[in-house]
Amino acid sequence: PIAPGNNYQATNYNQQPQPSSNNLTTFKTNKAMWVTKLVTGILMIIVSLFIFFQGTLMGIGNTIANNHHTSGTAGIFTALFYLVAGIVYLSTKKMHSLGGDIANCIILIITWLFAITNADKVFADLKIWGWLALIIGAGFLIWHIIDNKKNKS
């Protein structure tokens, strides 16, 4: 029921606006971080299960040997920290603010301190998990800061 003489044009409401060339490069950078956080979050959850079983076996071994080592318990807590960090990465993967990365960096620094101080000869792998946590936490925070500065200019 369009009256003749009206200059009415049909509009395609399904058509998405095309990004400008400046927005396209920003989108690619954010997509790379999004995918990396997704993959890292999933891998951290999987690794947390491995660390949990490793820590449980070390704890059982320490109990049987009655050697008073606490590295098995430290491994279980390290696994818990990895699990929390993986969930945080998955839940904040699309955020442009630094809140999720700052929280995760703090969690993973605590993981690093906890793991390297409680590692011993029985569970030396705990040092590796601690250093890996520090590298992941600091790496994402630095990457996100650099990405935000690049997008502002």
Image: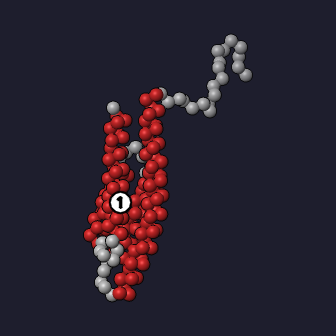
- On the image, the x and y values in percent for residue 100 come to 38, 52
- On the image, the x and y values in percent for residue 149 come to 32, 38
Quadrant for residue 135, please give it: bottom left
Name the amino acid type tagged 1: Leu
Would you place residue 17 above or below residue 86 in this image? above
Quadrant for residue 121, please give it: bottom left
Quarter of the N terminus within the rendering = top right
| Residue shown at 32% from the left, 67% from the top | 127
- On the image, the x and y values in percent for residue 98 come to 35, 47
Would you place residue 51 above or below residue 61 in this image? above
Asked whether 116 or 45 is in front, the reply is 116
Q: Secondary structure at mark 1?
A: helix
Q: Which residue does the numbered mark 1 point to in the structure image?
A: 132
Asked whether 80 or 60 is in front, the reply is 60
Residue at the far right in the pictured view: 1
- On the image, the x and y values in percent for residue 122 come to 33, 77
Would you place residue 43 above or below residue 145 in this image? below
